[in-house]
Amino acid sequence: MNETYDLLRRAADHAVHYRASLANQAVAVPVDPLTLRRRFGVALPDAPTPPDEVIDELTLAASDGLVATAGPRFFGFVIGGSLPAATAADMVALGWDQVAFNATLSPAAAAAEEVAGEWLKDLLGIPASASVGFVTGAQAANTVGLAAARHHAYAELGWDVERDGLVGAPPVRIVAGVERHATIDRSLRLLGFGTGAIEKVAADDHGAIDLADLERVLSAGHGPSIVCLQAGNVNTGACDDLRRACEIVHRHGGWAHVDGAFGLWAAASPRTAHLVSGVELADSWGCDGHKWLNVPYDSGFVFCSRPEVHAAAVSYTASYLVGSGGAPGLSDFALESSRRARGFAVWAALRELGRQGAAGLVERTCRLARRFAGRLASGGVEIVNDVVLNQVLVSVGDDEFTDRVVGAVQQEGTCWLGGTTWRGRRLIRISVSNWSTTDDDIDRSADAILRIVAQERDADRERSR
């Protein structure tokens, strides 16, 4: 037992050292993939290796290949670095090694998820009566939410889709905006609808769904429909008018699913809650924890206004897995059965933040996004979107020049951001999601971007001479 204690302390020391270095280190270091691969070895050794040596070898081999996604200057994708209490809770949970399948396997995991789920619904403006599933992320959340929608739509038609599948089934309409996230398409593929079934709705200038076109599309057909709405466009941060959209969907007898991977968190702050007004009217919702809530990867949530529909769509039917009480359990609301106890870290993050801290996290990162946009604009580059949340779209030139700047910024290491294509243009996409990001991090990063833009323009002028 002493050896295990020493080993876990050794691992914790490695983790603490890494986290302590995040604020000052380069966000990413150029590394040769083959060299990195060789550090992890070639052939599996014949003999066992002492665990402490294994941990030391692992940390040494991985060191140059780690990207500081948990740090304050990583602005790519929509990634938050885990909060201190959430990180520590996840480390403890690994030691506990609980299987969060049901309350029999882990009463504590079940209780943590139940309480954390109630807190999440409260913060996100979702009805208290909704069910909650703890999943891997927005992809799984959207898949489960749309599976519930599929069950409901076919039950309305008198078709048992879980038993009989989709072969020979009556049609169900799938409606989604042109600015939907790619996870919606993948979910529809996995659920057997296929992307060709999507009836597309136009978007406004900011990427939110066009309500008049939504009305037109729904009026043009008949039968049950599943409509995919969005809170937080992945490029612009724009949110659909959920109140009016849900009213239109329900007037046509449809199911409204909200993909709110990060945008649902706007509800946590009184300053941004208006962006998701009417969120409670939807039928299902998907949301991430490892984005704006800043809990460790991987963590996501799916909510459903009809718990019985939610469970019917994804629960087990095997007799040895069904609880004697008959009430749905943890894994009746998620796709995984053998899953880790994510609820401990979520509970810890929410307990650390409280209602005011959650609001403050959203407000501060939105303010920092506006600061980022302001610094870049004052340096002569174009900010393409209205910065309504934490997303900033930046134009620095044509497509080739933009990709060069993105690559140079990533190589330089002050910060990390990515490129995107929006409305036919290559742009820089910046997401400010990390709890530890400061004004100084924003200013350093903006200065680095502007410096690199100037260097690349100078290089172009030299080449043209």
Image (cartoon, rainbow, N blue to C red):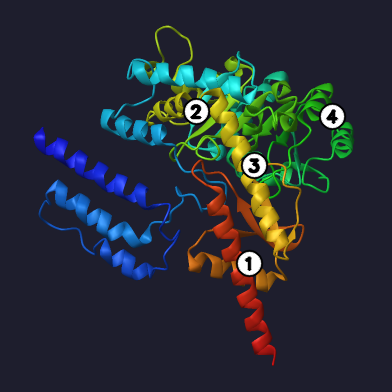
Left or right of residue 379: residue 451:
left
Q: Nearer the viewer, mark 4 or mark 3?
A: 3
Residue at which label 1 appears? 450
Vertically, is 418 above or below 136? below
Residue 222's disc number: 4
Which of pointers 2 and 4 indicates the residue nearer the eye?
A: 2
Q: Which residue is mark 2?
A: 353
Q: Is residue 458 left or right of residue 323?
A: right
Compute the Cα span from label 1 to label 3: 21 Å
Q: Residues within 10 Å of mark 1 (few under 14, many from 20)?
A: many
Relative to the observer, which residue lies in front, 167 or 136? 136
Residue at horizontal 60 percent and vertical 14 percent from the top: 128
Amino acid on which disc 3 is placed: Cys
Q: Dot 4: what SS? A: loop
Return the disc, 2 or 4, that comes first in the chain's sequence: 4
Residue 257 image position (x, y, % from top left)? 68, 30
